[in-house]
Amino acid sequence: MLAVTPDEMKMIDKTAINQFGIPGIVLMENAALGVVREVAGILGEIPGKKAIVLAGKGNNGGDAFAVARHLFNMGAHVDVYAPAKLDDIKGDAKINLDILLKMGIEVNEVLESQHIDGIEERLKFSDIVVDGLLGTGLKGEVTGVMAGVIDAVNRSCVPVVAVDIPSGVDGETGKVSTACIKARTTVTFAFPKIGQLVHPGCEYVGKLEIVDIGIPKAAVRENEIKKYLIDSGLVSKLIPKREPNSNKGTYGKVLVVAGSRGMTGAACLTGSAALRAGAGLVYMAAPLSLLPIYACSLVEALTIPLEDGNKGYITGESIHKILMQLEKVDVAAVGPGLSTEDDIKEVVHSIVKNSKVPIVLDADGINVLAEDLSVLKELKTQMVITPHPGEMARLLGATVKEVQEDRINIARSFSKEYGVITVLKGSRTIIASPEGEIYINTTGNAGMATGGSGDVLTGIIASFIGQGLKPLDAAVVGVYLHGTCGDNVARRKGEHGLIAGDLVREIPKVIFETDGSRG
């Protein structure tokens, strides 16, 4: 599903209105009906229920005026408040305002702080609030009377249905004003907005409902948009089918270059995740002194013993053997638990420079890469790089705070500059391609903030590349399934005790439930 900025949504609306002749008031009416359906779903029976409708002076307010009309006609007691002079309301919003007034519904101007007292009193007896104060184009702080109204609503604890976006959330960046509506449900129109999907804005949205308001698909195609929300529909189409007439070679050979003394678990998690996600064969490139651990922990994988002089990590002497093995596989997963010993930089750089099969780079592979990013200019293949915010900060010489405040642009600019697919992990993982495409993932939970979780993701992505998916598609599928595994486990066991091994065990079930080819 597309995800749009407010400006992109305006262009789509304008195309629908100007090129396809759909009146703006029709789109507004469809939007209002979507909000009304959600309100009805929360309240159940509408007659006799008490609703407060807050309407600004823009189109968001026009939607809210139309919602008030429908709720009134359905038998609700409706109080409408507008923190604006009614004479300042224009266009389609004014049409819906005038209808309300002709119906005898009072619209109360809220222009001074003492007017908020009346809203607070009504909130004590209200069943629901409809927030149509501000739209998706907000920039900066909400102040004055508007801020006072928002604070009063939040203090009341009355459930709020936000029209398009909670008032106070920046629809482009997800930044929030000090005064910001905390919605139970947000009903957004046509497509999700970026600010609803990323932090901190997503924390104020509540349940996000996306409503079709009748915009033609052709109007969307007229506006080239490269941002997407990853959903089950997209992923189900990408999961490779298993053909009856096939064998283990059909589903890819994955080379795992990972692990060192004290961190063998990282390699084993990556290898087991690759197998559980469907890889036909997994080869574990293991330091010889640690080979028994790999062999016992992952009996389904094949091991590639690498002489290490009992050092417990892969040394430079093993590079030739690794490069030989790269010629026999379909993808390499490099980095989890490798350590940052001096030899590791040479190993990673040699793989990056020489591999002709796609590489999934994670963890210590990223850490040693951060010392010299110029090696990425020598890539002969596609790479998926999977940093968490700390690793991304090291790559850029930035702070974690700077990364977290601008995750989409950080990921996009890194991908464009270095020609790699960036998977910036964390809550609301961002995937960026060198061509500027952005994918936002909403699966996953705080229970996945545990050692080994990222190693599992590396294995899943590598597995799907091995099975024939393009690296970008494999990243999309891998991130979504990985998060869904975490959500499934958290629903059964809670978040506190979730461990990486739980994710691995959940992979087959999640693929089975998501796979669209099962009919």
Image: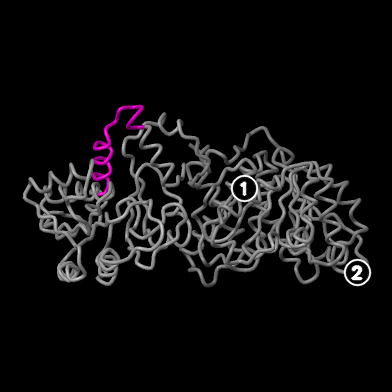
Q: Amino acid at mark 2?
A: Asn
What range of the chain is rendered magenta?
16-35
Query: Which residue sits at x=63%, y=67%?
Result: 399
**SS at mark 2 in the image:** loop
Percent position of residue 476, x then y = 58, 47
**SS at mark 1 in the image:** helix
Query: Which residue sits at x=50%, y=35%?
Result: 224
Q: Amino acid at mark 1?
A: Ala
Density class for disc 1 (Cα within 10 Å; few <14, some 14-19, many ≥20) is many
Of residue 332 and residue 285, the one placed in the foreground of this image is 332
Residue to which mark 1 is pinned: 475
Percent position of residue 38, x then y = 27, 51
Magenta span has 29?
yes
Q: Is residue 136 left or right of residue 58?
A: right
Percent position of residue 443, x then y = 50, 55
The mark found on residue 187 in the picture is none
Of residue 515 and residue 263, the one placed in the foreground of this image is 263
- If you read the primary sequence from the N terminus, does the residue marked by circle 1 or circle 2 appear first? 2
How far is the residue under mark 1 from the one under mark 2? 35 Å
Magenta span has 422?
no
Q: Quadrant of residue 45?
A: bottom left
The mark found on residue 310 in the picture is 2
Of residue 279 and residue 164, the one placed in the foreground of this image is 164
Instruction: Tell me the chief SS of the magenta region.
Output: helix
Q: Residue furthest left?
A: 104
Do callouts 1 and 2 mark residues in contact (Cβ within 8 Å)? no
Percent position of residue 301, x then y = 76, 53
Q: Residue furthest top?
A: 20
